[in-house]
Amino acid sequence: MIELPDEAATCTFAACLASEAVAGDIIGLSGTLGVGKTVFARAFIRALTQPHEVVPSPTFTLMQHYASPQLAVYHYDLYRIESDNEVQELGFEDAMANAVSLIEWPERASIPQTEQRLDILIKEVAGACSEKRHLKIKVGEGWSKRFKSILAVFEATAND
């Protein structure tokens, strides 16, 4: 469990994660409405593109594509998805092979459990300030070494 005291820490952690992402990674972001999935996704994408990149929630478009010199990112919001066919129509399989797939509400579709999958459950901390979050993370085999590096960088940054 990772504790994030505020939105700035959430953005820092997302940027640390982005620094280790590679093509083929699938990152699932789960949690209740308004918990900060899009905040996390926005920070992740901005870390790879530009600090002021416009990153809207893809709730109604279902998917947004972002290109960066290092890596392409497909940002999905599956909240309104009703079937796996809809996910396939978005070109998910092509994105999986050539980019990072950042997916809000991954539990709403059958997303492959590959070794490059990382799932993050974002939870509000009861009784805490409104920005404090806990992250529960499930790391696929392809993330295990990278994730140790991410944690080390994040902890060093948090202690500065």
Image (cartoon, rainbow, N blue to C red):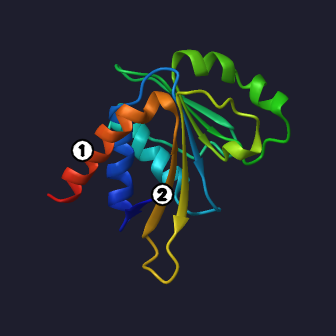
Q: Which image quadrant is residue 47 in? A: top left
Looking at the rendered image, the quarter that the N terminus falls into is bottom left
Tag of residue 119: none
Task: Estimate how packed mark 1 is, as few (under 14), some (14 to 19) or many (20 or more) residues with alpha carbons within 10 Å.
Answer: some
| Residue 44 rendering spot, x and y as whole percentages | 41, 41
Q: Which image quadrant is residue 76 in? A: top right
Residue under the point 76% across and 38% down: 109
Residue under the point 23% across and 57% down: 158
Residue farthest left in this picture: 160
Residue under the point 25% across and 53% down: 155
**Mark 2 or mark 1, which is nearer the start of the sequence?**
2
Foreground residue, 27 or 39? 27
Foreground residue, 36 or 126? 126
Tag of residue 153: 1
| Residue 64 rendering spot, x and y as whole percentages | 58, 33
**SS type, badge 1:** helix
Tag of residue 135: 2
**Amino acid type, mark 1:** Val
Residue under the point 67% across and 19% down: 93
Task: Say if 126 sits above or below 116 in the image.
Answer: below
Task: Say if 122 sits above or below 44 in the image.
Answer: below
Q: Marks 1 and 2, Cα distance to the nearest angstrom?
A: 16 Å
Task: Say if 27 sits above or below 1 in the image.
Answer: above
Task: Estimate how packed mark 2 is, as few (under 14), some (14 to 19) or many (20 or more) residues with alpha carbons within 10 Å.
Answer: some
Horizontal side, residue 15 vs residue 116: left or right: left
- Count how many numbered circles sit on residues in the image: 2
**Amino acid type, mark 2:** Leu
Horizontal side, residue 157 vs residue 5: left or right: left
Foreground residue, 48 or 96? 96
Horizontal side, residue 106 vs residue 65: left or right: right
